[in-house]
Amino acid sequence: MTTVWLPCGDYHENYTEDQGWWQSRLIKGKMILLLLLVFVVIPLLSKYEIILDSYWLGVANMIGYTAMGALGVQLLIGYAGLITLGHAAFVAVGAYTSTLLILKFPWPQVILDLGLAYPISILVAAIVAGFWSVLFGLPSARVKGFYLILTTMAAQFITVDFILTQYVSKIGGRGQAFSLPPGTIKIGPWAIETDTQRYYLMIILLTFSVIIMANLLRSRVGRAWIAIRDNDIAAETLGINIIWYKLLNFFVAGFLAGLAGAFWVCNCAALSPEHFPWFWSLWLVGVILIGGAGINGAIYGSIFMVMIMEILQMAVIPLSEYESLEFLIVKFAFIKDMAFGLAICAFLIYEPRGLSYRWWQIKNYFNLWPFSY
């Protein structure tokens, strides 16, 4: 009699399989389809304006920029329990470092001919932003909670409102902004000028950020961060150097913020401190509150918040054509802030675990069907 083995699932026989990213054929298939959608389908649809146009690529770039900034906030708050309200400062440091390197640094002609100035500036900007983040993370060795919030807020006001506004932005006799002429930002022989080129750069940087964060979180470093978040006293008792791991967390979060800032440079005709207000720091915290835990939470929250604001703008513009409703377009910034606050309140009341938890529940429902209950 022949024995017939029925497929009952995927079993992990070692730690490597247990920590693998794509742990089954179904997940591999879904991820391949997702990559094809992101790298091939969306740009083609936009290029030929079948469903999307270049406007929606601009929206996608904004989503990616928000997600890169939110990943750093998620790393600080979600994985290490270090509350921050000044993350826009580190994004600004990355943006200004990249801009100054492009416009002011005396690059060898061979570097300029090969179009390597901007790629090198991205890496340097991320490292500088990481160390700048560590500088303001030093108080985390002594304080936490409300006092750490004040420290990170100080990072925002010292960096953006004082150093960048009063000194850095005036380098070269400029008033408040650095002009970035067309053709300045190049990668190899290609100048990053169109929305499609910016989209591909965004996808590459976002993918790189996700890979860095995902690999750190499933390593010894990530487990130490989670232990510190859950109970820092117990973690220290177990031999974890909590000061070292907190500062490392600040560095990686600042590194990711620097990547976001360096990417944002290619979206600006002129860079000024007005691009990095304190509200942007609050916005990034709101994104992870709405998105929920994990890397997915930062991405889902970014998609939700950016799309909600775009839909709100689409609704306000037609209404403002009526004479009695003209004030809507003038006061759209206030309407946007109100919508942001209402969204956070609604999620805290009705979906406190965020979009990532809801998506996890939906996936489980279909994976367990017909025994979903």
Image (cartoon, rainbow, N blue to C red):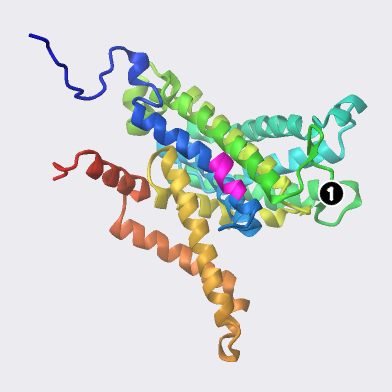
Give the residue drawn at x 51%, y 33%: 210
Q: Tag 1: residue type?
A: Pro
SS of the residue at dot 1?
loop
Crowd class of label 1 (few under 14; some 14 to 19; many from 20; radius 10 Å): few
Residue 143 in view in this figure: no
Residue found farthest to the bottom: 324
| x and y percentages locating residue 195 in the rendered image | 69, 50
Q: Is residue 43 magenta?
A: yes
Q: Quadrant of residue 9?
A: top left
- Residue at image position (82%, 38%) is 102
Residue lying farthest front?
Answer: 1
- Rendered position, 373 above or below 6: below
Q: In the rendering, at what x and y percent does residue 76 appear?
A: 47, 37
Q: Is residue 216 left or right of residue 368?
A: right
Q: Position of residue 230 (x, y in %)?
A: 33, 32
The rendered magenta stretch, by its main secondary structure, is classed as: helix
- Does the image show residue 287? yes
Side (left or right) of 97 relative to 3: right
Q: Which residue is mark 1?
A: 182
Q: Position of residue 187 (x, y in %)?
A: 77, 34
Q: Residue furthest left?
A: 1
Whether 1 is drawn above or below 203: the answer is above
On-image quarter of the N terminus: top left
- For the residue pair 329 and 20, the one nearer the viewer reads as 20
Q: Residue at x 46, y 55 (%)?
A: 304
Q: Residue at x 87, y 31 (%)?
A: 112
Judged left or right of residue 265, residue 45 is: left
Magenta segment boundaries in residue numbering:
38-44
